[in-house]
Amino acid sequence: MAQKRERQAVRSEQQIVRRLFSHAKIGEEEKRCVREFLVSYGYLPPDFNDEQFKQGLVLARDLLLPGLNPGSKEFLAALALLTGAPRCGVRDADSGRVLQGYRLDFVNALPFTLRYWITPTPPDGVTLAAMRATLRSALLRWHQVEIGQTTIVNFEETSVRREAHIKFLWTEIDGIGSRIADAMPAELGEDRGIIRFDSLDSWTAVENLDDFHIGTIALHEIGHSLGLAHIFDPPDPKPTMDPNFDQREDLSLEDIDIKTLRDIYSHQ
Ligand SMILES: [Zn+2]
């Protein structure tokens, strides 16, 4: 309960900040957050110069805030707000170059099979059965994508973590908000192929606007396991692979997500 109250307090604080920003100049602290955000998500190299900073802002505008002038106060204020918004922890770009999807290197023919392992410890307030059911629904959505009549990927559960290509687990990432979850490409090995959910955020397996829906976020992260990068277009409908998360249940892939998976695996 204490955690829940704390989360509500953070949310109302974010609303106040949002209102203030619409009238005030952006401060030094916000500028620092913006720079940190741009470096950690790959818009800027760690030691960037002025020219790279400008290019990073333009890329952030193109991908995250289309239509705004990257030199304006409004743009910086909107970007500062985005730095605290819930999103995926996977990078959008690499030193200013937008990341593209790639095929898992051990895949030779279709369909290929990935084994998955699910933690036996669900997050607070979610039953083991509900957690498992919603994760499996998310896997099923990707399994249903075909090229012609051919399945692309099958999933098989294993109870042996080291034998799984994908491991679902909860761990502390960065506190409430910001990075909600992240993922590595599917791969065998104890510390590879991990999909992490932040245990400091609040989770649900049912329709509930206060908490993050496990299946919805898992659907996005499984995309990364399969080699997809973030997709920013079109804004409406928002791709499953858009890095910014909503707190609503939506276990459907958009056309662009399906097309991208097909494109990655359609060439032998
Ligand atoms: Zn992501």
Image: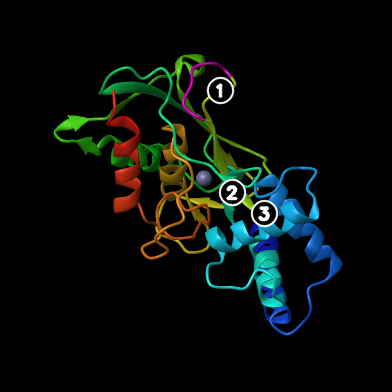
Q: Which residue is mark 1?
A: 192
Distance from the alpha carbon under mark 2 to that under mark 3: 8 Å
Identified by mark 1, the residue type is: Arg
Q: Is residue 230 magenta?
A: no
Image quarter of residue 4: bottom right
Viewed as shown, does residue 210 lie left or right of 43? left
Q: Residues within 10 Å of mark 3 (few under 14, many from 20)?
A: many
Q: Please say if 23 is above or below 265.
A: below
For the magenta stretch, what is the residue range? Answer: 185-190
Residue 10's x, y, as percent? 69, 65
Query: Disc 2 vs disc 3: which is toward the camera?
Result: 2
Q: Secondary structure at mark 3?
A: loop
Q: Main secondary structure of the magenta part?
A: loop
Is mark 2 in CB contact (under 8 Å) with mark 3? no
The 10 Å Cα crowd at callout 1, few under 14, some 14 to 19, many 20 or more, is some
Q: Which residue is mark 3?
A: 176
Q: Which mark is residue 180?
A: 2
Quick check: 190 left or right of 50? left
In this view, the residue farthest toward the right is: 28
Residue at x 43% of width, y 19% of height: 159
